Amino acid sequence: MTIRLYNTLTQRLEELAPLRAGHVGVYVCGVTTYDWAHAGHGRTYTSFDVLVRHLRARGHEVTHVQNVTDVDDKILNRAKELGEEPLALSARMNDLVDADLRTIGCLAPTHAPKVSTHIAEIVALVESLIAKGHAYAVKTDVGTDVYFAVRSFPPYGKLSHRKIDDLLSGARVEVDEKVKRDPLDFALWKGAEGAWGWPSPWGNGRPGWHIECSAMAEKYLGQHFDIHAGGMDLIFPHHENEVAQSEAAHGPDFAKVWLHGGFLSVDKEKMSKSLGNFVTIRDVLAKNDPEGFRYFLLGTHYRGPLGFDVDKREDGRVVFPGVDDAERRAEYLYTTREALVLAGGAGEPSTDAPSPHAKIVSEAKDKVLAALDSDLNAPVALGVLAELAKAGNEIATQVGRLKKDPAGQAKMQALARAAVRALDEACAPLGLMQASSADFFARTKLRRMKLRELDEAFVDGRLKERAEARKNKDFQRSDAIRKELAERGVEILDHGDTSSWRVAL
């Protein structure tokens, strides 16, 4: 078993070789908590949730750190707009973001450190950089700033593969240009006398964005660790600056492997709050099932671009076609499991049945893990699940056809039970099918009924009328009721003399 990941630093696939055998330290840059989490955040954290799940499935102990940026100018500005204390706003938004990520199946990190509770570690790291000649303090009208001296770190640009001179020629003239020694130098500490901040050797102030992650990663993972991950938009300047300040303080390598997820775009533009084109995770969950959304996010390789379609219908409804399609695929997995459970009955699972599907069942889990070994190739893993689900439905059908062959039916039932187990085990590293079938169907039914403004009592009443019509052989009336309900998005499922119903997307 070899896990190979694409390292942004070296620009090639590399075999994962943990610094400490059997243990992997993973740092993922978290959300700046001043607003709701958008669908692009959902993609980033789902991608690296699969990373953590897969590492654990392969037997590694994982320390997963995902910070909370609760000290930032964006938080301060939003708090002023709302008349709210900055840390109170951040805590409130963090709870909402965290709830959304848990809902779409992202596991809680091992540690979720907040900037506001790690000021001492940040100050200590800044002091170390000053002592080593990599940073300097400058007095301003509002306090004392501390800057990292980019030219004191010759490898600067190695992560983003940029040259310092090229960066300088394209550098913007900033407000603080007069106080910095070099236009490329970036803030480690921002003086803020009499404003929101914390005491430090340089007076009251607050940390710069980049130093925060370096200090928290060091505290929980050490000066050198295995994997640093985040969105592609963080490669420069955020992650580049993390590399510079951490390696200036402690030497290389800050992180051995750097993973970056691709953009999620709307109308070919990156989804972002600054562009105002973002769809929140809650917007999606108001219309779609969480696992449908997760399936959608996993349907494209994490490093590739992913388009998020927003369809505004003539009737005023807004739908997300790509997520709708993915929800149908997730639903198919659940209907498959339900069919297999009903067909399999009780007993031990076995793949000894003389069926061409036995091999698919026995190999599914290993195929999913092998796909994820290859740079977290979730789309290939989903293909394995689709193959398994197709085989599973055929197995369930075959069980019913073997009523006159008790011995053959028993073997096929054992294969059905093995297929249930294989489906659950193959889905686990992807974070899919984590609910019971009953819970999945109940929550999707409830959401779809609400969207279509359906009343359960009304539908049940129509089904009773239809049952009576069928009993009286009034098939014209029965068909009319089926058509009426279908026009309202209700699909009737007949099971001999009984019927059930479900709501279409």
Image: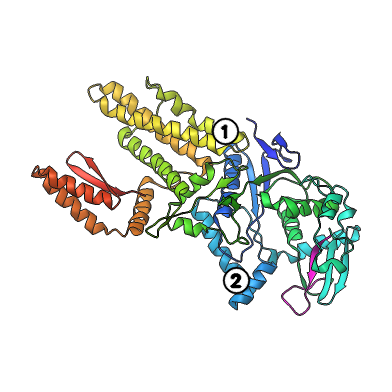
- Residue 193's place in the image compared with 401, above or below, is below
Residue density around tag 2, few if under 14, some if 14–19, many if 20 or more, within 10 Å: many
Give the x, y percent position of residue 126. 82, 62
Asked if the magenta segment contains residue 191, the reply would be yes
Q: Which is nearer the eye, 452 or 27?
A: 452
Residue density around tag 1, few if under 14, some if 14–19, many if 20 or more, within 10 Å: some
449 displayed left or right of 125:
left
The count of marks equals 2
Give the x, y percent position of residue 309. 50, 50
- Residue 469's place in the image compared with 398, above or below, is below
Label 1 sits on residue: 371
Residue 37, by quadrant, is bottom right
206 displayed left or right of 391:
right
Q: Which mark is residue 89?
A: 2
Q: Which mark is residue 47?
A: none
Query: Where the N terminus falls, by quadrant?
Result: top right
Q: What is the three-letter code of the residue carrying label 1?
A: Ala
- Residue 420's place in the image compared with 123, above or below, is above
Asked if the magenta segment contains residue 437, the reply would be no
Display coloring: rainbow
Q: Quick one: SS at disc 2?
A: helix
Question: What secondary structure prevails in the magenta region?
Answer: loop
Query: In the rendered image, is residue 85 in sight?
Result: no
Magenta-highlighted residues = 185-200
Residue situated furthest top in the rendering: 354
Residue 74, by quadrant, is bottom right
The residue shown at (37%, 22%) is 353
Q: Quick one: SS at disc 1?
A: helix
The residue shown at (21%, 45%) is 499
Give the x, y percent position of residue 234. 70, 52
